[in-house]
Image (tube, grey):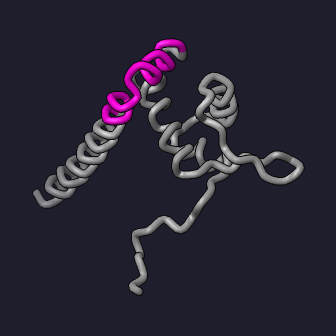
Amino acid sequence: MALNLNKNLKLFYSIKEVAEMFGLNESTLRFWETEFPYLKPKTAGPSKVRQYSTKDIEQIRLIHNLVKVRGFKIAAAKKIINSNRDGADKTAEVLTRLITVRDELQDMKRQLDGLQ
């Protein structure tokens, strides 16, 4: 069996790590948990420490795209997700890919500018 180096070995992320991934406050994530019923991270121990799975992070990515990137209000984001879940998922995925491509192109431009 070959070792897969690209595989993400971490199963759960803390609320602090997830907040940093998206540039959000931890309180924003807690608020989203109350507004979006399908966003329920696992809680562990007596202190109820939140543990976000990769599935939870994909849910947050979708909500972040709708609320923070595209500027929808919470109620509108809920309506979009409930009425057209697959379309909202695909839109978020496309946007993420476009941002990645843009960043790569900007890096290439900086490298080319450095050659002149």
Instruction: State the residue in front, 80 or 23.
Output: 80
Instruction: State the residue in front, 98 or 59.
Output: 59
Residue at x 51%, y 40% (from the top left corner): 22
In the image, residue 59 sits, relative to residue 104, either above or below, namely above
Instruction: State the residue in front, 82 or 50.
Output: 82
Q: Is residue 92 left or right of residue 61?
A: left
In the image, residue 58 sits, relative to residue 83, either above or below, namely below
* Residue 36 location (% of width, % of height): 60, 26
Among the 4 quarters of the image, the one containing residue 25: top right
Q: Main secondary structure of the magenta part?
A: helix
Q: Quadrant of the N terminus?
A: bottom left
Residue at x 41%, y 19% (from the top left corner): 83
**Number of callouts in the render?**
0
Residue at x 62%, y 48% (from the top left corner): 52
Q: Is residue 88 left or right of residue 26?
A: left
Q: Is residue 76 left or right of residue 86?
A: right
In the rendered image, the residue lying farthest to the left is: 116
Residue 89 lies in the magenta-colored region: yes
* Residue 103 location (% of width, % of height): 28, 47
In the image, residue 49 sits, relative to residue 3, either above or below, namely above
The stretch in magenta equals 75-91
Instruction: State the residue in front, 100 or 58.
Output: 58
* Residue 19 location (% of width, % of height): 60, 41
In the rendered image, the residue lying farthest to the right is: 46
* Residue 37 location (% of width, % of height): 62, 28
Residue at x 56%, y 43% (from the top left corner): 56
Residue 107 lies in the magenta-colored region: no
Q: Is residue 34 left or right of residue 90?
A: right
Q: Quadrant of the C terminus?
A: bottom left
In the image, residue 10 sits, relative to residue 88, either above or below, namely below
